[in-house]
Image (tube, grey):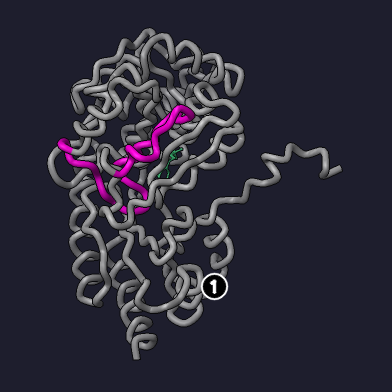
Amino acid sequence: MEHLVNSRVKDIEISGIRKFFNMVANSPNLISLTIGQPDFPTPEHVKEAGSRAIADNFTTYTHNAGFLELRKAACEFVQQKYGLTYDFEQEVIVTVGASQAIDIAFRTILEEDVEVILPGPVYPGYEPIIKMCGAKPVYVDTRENGFRLTAELVEPFINENTRCIVLPYPSNPTGVTLSEQEILELANLLKDKPIWILSDEIYSELVYAGTHQSIAKWLREKTIVINGLSKSHSMTGWRIGFLFASAFLTAHMLKVHQYSVSCTSSISQKAAFEALTTGFNDADYMRKQYKKRRDYVYKRLTEMGLEVEKPTGAFYMFPSIKKFGKTSFDFALDLVNQAGVAVVPGSAFSKYGEGYVRLSYAYSLETLEKGLDRLERYIKTISK
Ligand SMILES: Cc1ncc(COP(=O)(O)O)c(C=O)c1O
């Protein structure tokens, strides 16, 4: 019967991050620096709000877009934090994590044979959905440009088939962000073009220099902003994301959302409300810790002689391993087998990630120190 499975779905592979993680998960005494999962627990007051929602029988369907006060809180959050103005009645949808936001945004704007421009390397959550829509991912190699998708780089890739450009900054896997000047230049390039911008801002609360800037501040009409609480409030399992866009587009996206999930979990929505209001600044503490870890990991990697961009956001580093003459997969596999530490092969982030590995520093300083000691010993053995 397998020949009756949709061929586009058959062609999709499971994420390289998961694949590698599953492969090495049972290695004994392994230190894993692989996962993009904050190591902090969800803040106590947010957990209590979730429990209260159950006790109070807030356990039924809500409005498809999310309960009104939550949508209002989400709009106020992005207004106060990033200067973005959205109407809570018509321009925001509460989604099942940022993942579902990406899914419904693409399914609303894409169709057969249109093209979507992405920076390479990139988070692997976009390409499969683009392909399931029958559209074509077009990668722009950002490796020689500090992993930044700038106006100059992107311009030659724009043609009459271009339907969307993905701007995933701060970036997973590289940790880089775009400067305000770079965003302005992109806005200038795109302002008169019939192209959507999908701005995935899930790491917006984890920016280490200045404040997060969204291209929606300049190109609101053509931008779909994706955000969520997975990273900012350490709420990955609660599955809360947000989509912000113009009213006419949100109305279309809401149809896709409605027929996909009806609404996000009511219990998680109550917890999300608490996170966005009382927990407005909950990310501050975590950001400070991540920044310390970033400084530590960056120092260690550069002392080991690895070339790496200093991240300005998120909690990943993407050092080059090209000089060792191994593929990123072989490097990562040997590192597990010979040194007992796991990182993600760069090839999990498109072919433009080849020659790099991704380390997550969403781990305690103690774990990072042990993992980096092992990495250092391994590098010494293969450098001889
Ligand atoms: C860039 C990026 N977008 C979206 C997601 C998905 O987020 P969520 O867990 O809220 O679905 C992730 C998760 O790692 C991510 O790194």
Q: Residue at x 50, y 28 (%)?
A: 106
Q: Residue at x 41, y 48 (%)?
A: 122
The one of 157 and 30 positioned closer to us in this rendering: 157
The one of 101 and 22 positioned closer to us in this rendering: 101
As drawn, is 377 to the left or to the right of 297?
A: right
On-image quarter of the C terminus: bottom left
* Count of numbered circles in the view: 1
Residue 331: image location, x then y, percent: 45, 74
Q: Is residue 37 visible?
A: no
Residue annotated with mark 1: 27
Quarter of the rendered structure image containing ligand 1 = top left
Amino acid at dot 1: Ser
- Position of residue 86 relative to residue 319, above or below, is above
Which of the 4 image quadrants contains residue 165?
top left
Q: Is residue 307 visible?
A: yes
Q: Residue at x 32, y 35 (%)?
A: 201
Q: Secondary structure at mark 1?
A: loop
Quick check: is 167 in the magenta stretch? Answer: yes
- Position of residue 316 relative to residue 94, above or below, is below
Residue 266: image location, x then y, percent: 49, 21
On-image quarter of the N terminus: top right
- Position of residue 58 relative to residue 287, above or below, is above
Residue 124: image location, x then y, percent: 48, 47
The region drawn magenta spans 153-181
Tag 1: Cα neighbours inside 10 Å, few (<14), some, or many (≥20)?
A: few
As drawn, is 277 to the left or to the right of 27?
A: left
